Image (tube, rainbow, N blue to C red):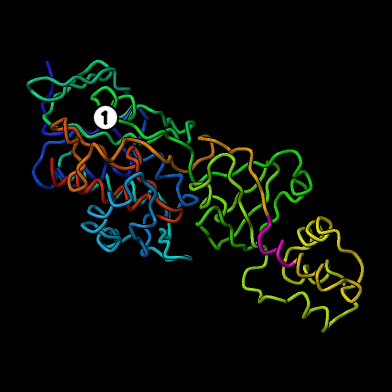
C-alpha cells in the first residue's frame, strides 16, 4: 500500500525544503525524503555556521551553465528581497558583509528552523534517515520506495544536490535518477574549490597560511578578493571563485598589487634609490610573501642599482604572475558542483522535464552554478519557488 501525495521531493536541503514550502502553501500535499538523519545539513555548515543565505547583488551573469540564459526566469520571479522578507518575517537578525553577502547574525540553524516552520504550516511530511531504494514511473505517476515504505505522487522533484562534500552524505544520485528518465547530464566537476600546485612551486608552499588581496584571472574572467596560500596550493575567496572557471591545463594569473599605476617601481626607485625591492614589496604585502616574490624575481640590492628595464619586467610579472595548477582539492573540499542535469531538457519557467511530465529538477542538481557569496542559495530558493508554483 502506497501513501499518496501531490508531490514527492527528494532532498531536504535548501531547494527541496523551499520547494515543499511553496507547494504546500498552495494546498499541495507534499512528502520530502532525505537519506540524512536530519534536514538541512549543508545549510547548517554554510557561511561558517551563519549561512550566507543570499546575495543582494544577484544577477544571472554570475551563474555558470551551458545555457547562460536558463537561470534568468527563475531568478527574476523570486529575488533576494523576496527571501529577505521571509527572513525578516521570522525575526531573524542579519547583516551584510562585503560584496552583497547576507548572513544571519546568529546561527544557520535559524534558516533551517524557518524552512521547517514554513513546511509545518503547510503540513509537509519530512522523512529523514532512509535512502531511496527505487523510483518508478507509471500511469498513476511516480512510486518511490524508501526504507520499509513507499509513496506515490503525480509529481517528483529531484533536489538531492551534487556530489560536493561527500562526508555530508552528498552523492551523484540526482544524475543517476535523471539518466533513468532519459535526461542528459553535463559532466559534474568540483567548483568553488581550492586549487593544488605542482612540486616545482615549492617556494610558495612555504607560505602556507599567508593571505593577501589580489586580482586573480583565468581566461577572460577575473575576481578581486583575498587569496590564501596553503600547504597544497592556493585557496581563499578569489581562488574559489576562479576555480569554477578553471579547466585542467589552464594558467591562473595573479596580480599581487592591484591598483598600482604603471611605472610605480621606477617611481619608487627615483624617490628612494637606496631601498631594496623586498622592502618596497613588504610595505604592501605580508612580509613572507614579499620575501618569496623578491627571491623569485632575483632582483637584489638597492633599487637605484637596478635598471628601469629590469623594474618594468618585475612590475609586469607582479601584475600577472602565472600559476598552472595541477588539479583541485576535489569534491571533498568543493563548496558546490558545477555541471549537473542538462538545462536543455528542462523548462526554465517551471523546472519540469520537457519530455517527462511531472518530473522536476532544482537547486545544485541542475547545471546552474553561482559565484561564491550566497548566489547558490539564491538559486536554490528561486528554482525551488519555480517548481513549487508549478507542481
Q: Crowdedness of circle 1 by 10 Å Cα count: few (<14), some, many (20+)? A: many
- Which quadrant of the view contains residue 13? top left
Image spot of residue 389 (x, y percent): 14, 47
What range is drawn magenta here? 315-321
- Count of marks overlaid on the render: 1
Q: For this view, does 165 lie left or right of residue 282?
A: left
Q: Which of 112 and 343 is in front in this view?
A: 343
In the displayed structure, 172 sits above or below 324; it is above
Query: Residue at image x 42%, y 44%?
Result: 44
Residue 193, position as x, y percentages in the image:
53, 44
* Quarter of the image where one finds residue 264: bottom right
Height in image: 1 above or below 13? above
* The C terminus lies in quadrant: top left
Indicate the position of residue 254 as horizontal and vertical percent values: 64, 58
Q: What residue is shown at x 92% (from left), y 73% (from top)?
A: 305
In which quarter of the view is residue 285 placed? bottom right
Q: Report the residue that reaches farthest toward the bottom.
A: 271
Magenta span has 247? no
Residue 105 in the image: above or below residue 233: below
Left/right placement of residue 304 relative to residue 311 reads right
Q: Residue furthest front?
A: 309
Residue positioned 92% across, 68% down in the render? 301
How far from the left and from the top, in percent, is residue 278? 83, 66
| Quadrant assignment for the N terminus | top left
Q: Which residue is drawn at 51% across and 52% down?
A: 241
Identify residue for label 1: 183
185 vs 328, left or right, is left
Task: Tell me the SS state at disc 1.
Answer: loop
- Give whichever of 267, 30 is nearer the camera: 267
Whether 148 is drawn above or below 158: the answer is above
Name the magenta segment's main secondary structure: helix
The foreground one among 112 and 176 is 176
Amino acid at each position: 500500500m502506497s501513501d499518496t501525495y501531490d508531490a514527492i521531493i527528494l532532498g531536504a536541503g535548501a531547494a527541496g525544503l523551499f520547494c515543499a514550502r511553496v507547494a504546500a502553501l498552495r494546498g499541495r500535499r507534499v512528502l520530502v525524503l532525505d537519506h540524512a538523519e536530519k534536514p538541512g545539513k549543508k545549510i547548517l555548515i554554510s557561511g561558517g555556521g551563519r549561512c550566507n543565505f543570499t546575495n543582494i547583488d544577484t544577477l544571472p551573469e554570475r551563474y555558470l551553465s551551458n545555457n547562460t540564459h536558463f537561470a534568468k526566469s527563475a531568478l527574476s520571479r523570486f529575488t533576494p528581497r523576496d527571501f529577505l522578507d521571509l527572513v525578516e518575517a521570522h525575526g531573524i537578525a542579519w547583516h551584510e558583509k562585503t560584496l552583497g553577502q547576507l548572513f544571519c547574525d546568529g546561527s544557520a540553524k535559524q534558516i533551517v528552523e524557518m524552512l521547517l516552520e514554513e513546511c509545518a504550516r503547510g503540513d509537509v511530511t519530512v522523512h529523514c534517515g532512509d535512502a531511496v531504494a527505487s523510483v518508478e514511473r507509471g500511469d498513476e505517476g511516480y512510486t518511490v520506495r524508501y526504507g520499509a515504505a513507499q509513496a506515490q505522487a503525480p509529481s517528483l522533484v529531484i533536489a538531492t544536490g551534487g556530489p560536493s562534500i561527500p562526508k555530508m552524505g552528498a552523492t551523484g544520485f540526482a544524475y543517476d535518477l535523471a539518466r533513468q528518465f532519459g535526461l542528459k547530464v553535463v559532466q559534474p566537476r568540483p567548483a568553488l574549490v581550492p586549487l593544488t600546485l605542482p612540486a616545482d612551486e615549492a617556494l610558495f608552499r612555504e607560505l602556507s597560511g599567508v593571505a593577501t588581496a589580489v586580482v586573480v584571472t583565468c581566461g577572460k574572467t577575473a575576481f578581486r578578493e583575498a587569496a590564501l596560500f596553503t600547504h597544497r596550493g592556493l585557496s581563499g575567496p578569489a581562488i574559489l571563485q576562479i576555480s569554477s572557471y578553471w579547466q585542467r591545463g589552464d594558467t591562473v594569473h595573479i596580480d599581487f598589487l592591484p591598483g598600482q599605476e604603471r611605472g610605480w617601481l621606477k617611481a619608487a626607485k627615483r624617490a628612494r634609490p637606496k631601498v631594496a625591492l623586498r622592502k618596497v614589496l613588504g610595505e604592501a604585502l605580508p612580509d613572507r610573501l614579499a620575501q618569496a616574490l623578491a627571491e623569485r624575481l632575483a632582483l637584489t640590492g638597492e633599487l637605484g642599482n637596478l635598471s628601469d628595464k629590469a623594474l618594468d619586467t618585475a612590475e609586469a610579472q607582479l601584475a600577472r604572475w602565472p600559476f598552472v595548477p595541477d588539479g583541485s582539492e576535489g569534491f571533498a573540499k568543493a563548496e558546490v558542483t558545477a555541471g549537473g542535469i542538462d538545462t536543455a531538457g528542462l523548462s526554465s519557467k517551471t523546472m519540469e522535464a520537457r519530455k517527462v511530465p511531472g518530473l522536476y529538477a532544482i537547486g545544485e542538481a541542475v547545471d546552474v552554478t553561482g559565484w561564491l557569496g550566497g548566489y547558490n542559495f539564491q538559486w536554490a530558493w528561486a528554482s525551488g519557488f519555480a517548481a513549487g508554483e508549478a507542481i
